[in-house]
Image (cartoon, helix red, strand yellow):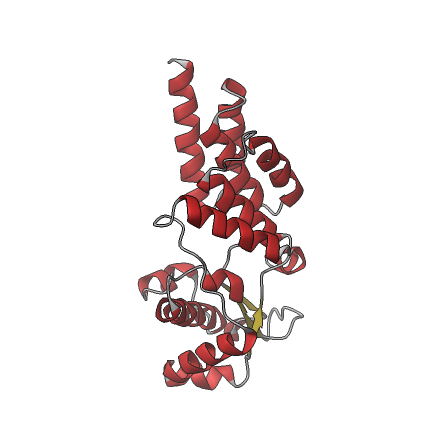
Amino acid sequence: MSSIERIEAWIDQGDEALDAGDFERALACFDEALEEDAEHWGASLGRVEALHALWRTEEAFQVLDAMRPADGQDDPDRADLEARVREAAGRFEEADRLFAEAHRLAPSEYPLPIRTSESDFREILDTVLESLPPVIRETVASVPVIVEPKPTAEIADRAPHITPDVLGLFVGSPVGDKVSAPSGYPDVVLLFQRNLERAGRNRREVAREIKITLLHEYGHYLGFDEEELEHLGLG
């Protein structure tokens, strides 16, 4: 097998691991590819994706800085990825400038995020809540929805499976576990506004993503596992 073939094989395995949520494995695969070619663009991008998903933000910045073109003409994939890493670090204005740059370079591939004010997003959310099935609307009264701009490393400490790009999260104890294994946290559903804004190309699509996310997270509260949620079309 040639060096090029080995690199392609490692990158394919890394991409598969990313899709499966096995980020440590993905990182190892991209590192193997970079052992063959330390400047391979695709492997470098994949390595940043894995570091980002693992909340290793500073390491991701180091790789992104090394990838920055010397001539100042950025690559849209690199710009969008750096925007997401900066967002995870809470550097929202810097992130939005990079999202705009990725859009300028590749407008069809990287649409501009639908940015809304706090009150505007809440208005969309209230409309979505009114459209939910009665059992979910009743649950919202005891398990409220809280909107945060982004997940944080502190939130990820409570839920190690989440990435900085997650749309929502149920925090607490599912109904069936309350007596035997309380979580120690109040029951809430968190929505992450900036991630949801990037999940759709217009307000209607953002509203749809909010609804799917709420149904998924309240499904967790009601005791459904991931396989059952997938079967219900809420994976």
Q: How many marks?
A: 0
Residue at 60% in and 50% down = 86
Residue 90 percent location from the top left of the image: 64, 56
Up-down relation of residue 122 to residue 14 (above or below): below
Given residues 229 and 120, the one toward you in this image is 120
Quarter in which the N terminus is drawn: top left
Residue 229 seen by the camera: yes
Quarter in which the C terminus is drawn: bottom left
Up-down relation of residue 175 to residue 200 (above or below): below
The answer to which quarter of the image holds residue 118 is bottom right
Residue 74 percent location from the top left of the image: 50, 37
Residue at 38% in and 85% down = 134
Residue 164 seen by the camera: no
Given residues 220 and 208, the one toward you in this image is 208
Residue 37 percent location from the top left of the image: 50, 20
Up-down relation of residue 25 to residue 80 (above or below): above
Residue at 38% in and 59% down = 227
Up-down relation of residue 49 to residue 128 (above or below): above
Given residues 128 and 87, the one toward you in this image is 87
Residue at 61% in and 47% down = 55
